[in-house]
Image: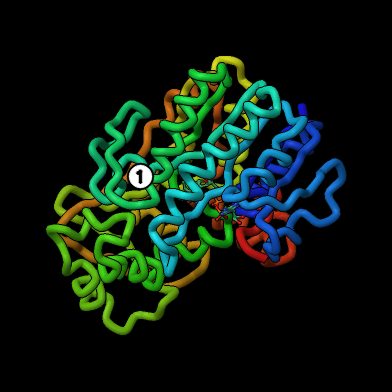
Amino acid sequence: MRVLVTGAAGRVGANMVRRLRAAGADVRAMVLPGDPQRAKLDGLDGVEIVEADLGDQSAVDAATRGVTHVVHLAAQLVRGDTPVDRFYDVNAFGTLRLLEGVVKSGGVERFLLASTDGTYRPGDPPLVPLPEDAPQVPADYYGTAKLLGEVILRNHAVQYDIPFAITRFATVLDPAEARRYFRVASVRTMLRRVELGRDSNIWPLFRQNPELAELFDDAVGDAADDVAVGLTGPDGPWSIHLLDVRDAVEGLYLALTVPAATGRAFNITAAEPTTFEDGADVVAELDGVPRLSVRLPLTWRLEMAVDAARDILGYRPRHDFRAMVESAIAAESGGTGATDSFVPARI
Ligand SMILES: NC(=O)c1ccc[n+]([C@@H]2O[C@H](COP(=O)([O-])OP(=O)(O)OC[C@H]3O[C@@H](n4cnc5c(N)ncnc54)[C@H](O)[C@@H]3O)[C@@H](O)[C@H]2O)c1
């Protein structure tokens, strides 16, 4: 197996490259020209690093030459100052360019695309939990561009007989990132996305409730940023599905290699969602910080069904939120993590 991994210096990519090497695959790791994060791939045997921008067809063509499998992770994720058309150019047309490269190179045994829960309208999910056949009606540029990537892949797969699979991830975190979750600072940052207006990927959450950030600030007062905080609404606690990057790469590996995955999409996430109350309990207990709970006028739940990945791929995620935080604490104190090692999202 000779695998092209795009986005190889990213949060998921650097971990996937190592997962593939552990399975004995040869890896071609595609990184953005000049990306300082490529240092994450330093010193790995059996890994060829190529620089290519998904906007550059000839570079993409060269990257696809001679590979048997593609794991397509490269994407534009963060809005910030990013022009809107870049989401479409990278996530939709970049996927098209990669597929064109694959066709010119004579095809592959499997093309695996990483997609997202963002294609299901995360700010106003149509179902709880979301199965793979839930309506995909995203409300922002990122989700829409990722969905277009899925559609373009399905089209090319039919036209050129490309065996494919799609993984739709929940929020992917490395353990160090998880450790910052369910705290005053991180919840405030999430609720302040209201200030981005319709540039936020969860803007429908704020449509009827523009005051969530203010209510939160009033409730927590001058509590320190690292204080643990749960959120509850009239229909129970808020919840979110988080995915440890180590489980993300297991899901990818299975979707790449299990024959029955061909032609299907799979939600990939933790075995269970985490409520904001349970998450705050874990943070307070493991980090010894005070614990608050805030009541808000609605309940937001972003949860995915993982039955298809479990039943068809044999996917068994091993890291719930507690395990992620334990890994982060162990890694910080010089250990290798509670279960296995990971490459942090940024170095
Ligand atoms: N992180 C999440 O919470 C999350 C959730 C759902 C789905 N996903 C999907 O998983 C995949 C991996 O995400 P991640 O968290 O590792 O993201 P990341 O931002 O850490 O990595 C993405 C990589 O893509 C590269 N890239 C961006 N534009 C490029 C271009 N024009 N040409 C070549 N490379 C380019 C970046 O340099 C980066 O290394 C993405 O497809 C993303 O849409 C991520």
Q: Residue at x 34, y 29 (%)?
A: 131
Cβ of mark 1 under 8 A from ligand 1: no
Vertical position of residue 329 compared to residue 121: above or below: below
| Quadrant of res 108 | top right
Q: Position of residue 96 (x, y in %)?
A: 52, 37
Q: Residue at x 70, y 36 (%)?
A: 64
Q: Residue at x 44, y 74 (%)?
A: 226
Q: Position of residue 336 (x, y in %)?
A: 73, 55
Q: Residues within 10 Å of mark 1 (few under 14, many from 20)?
A: many
Numbered disc 1: secondary structure: helix
Task: For residue 67, say whether it is visible.
Answer: yes
Compared across the picture, whether 75 is left or right of 132 comes to: right
Name the quadrant of the C terminus: bottom right
Residue ranking furthest to the bottom:
222
Name the quadrant of the N terminus: top right
Q: Residue at x 25, y 58 (%)?
A: 203
| Quadrant of res 272 | top left
In front here: 332 or 343? 343
Q: Position of residue 28 (x, y in %)?
A: 76, 41
Question: Which colour style is shown?
Answer: rainbow
Vertical position of residue 129 compared to residue 290: above or below: above
Q: Position of residue 195 (x, y in %)?
A: 27, 71
Compared across the picture, whether 333 is left or right of 122 comes to: right
- Residue at numbered disc 1: 144
| Count of picture labels | 1
Vertical position of residue 14 compared to residue 137: above or below: below
In front here: 56 or 201? 56
In front here: 3 or 343? 3
Task: For residue 14, say whether it is visible.
Answer: no
Q: Look at label 1 and name its amino acid.
A: Thr
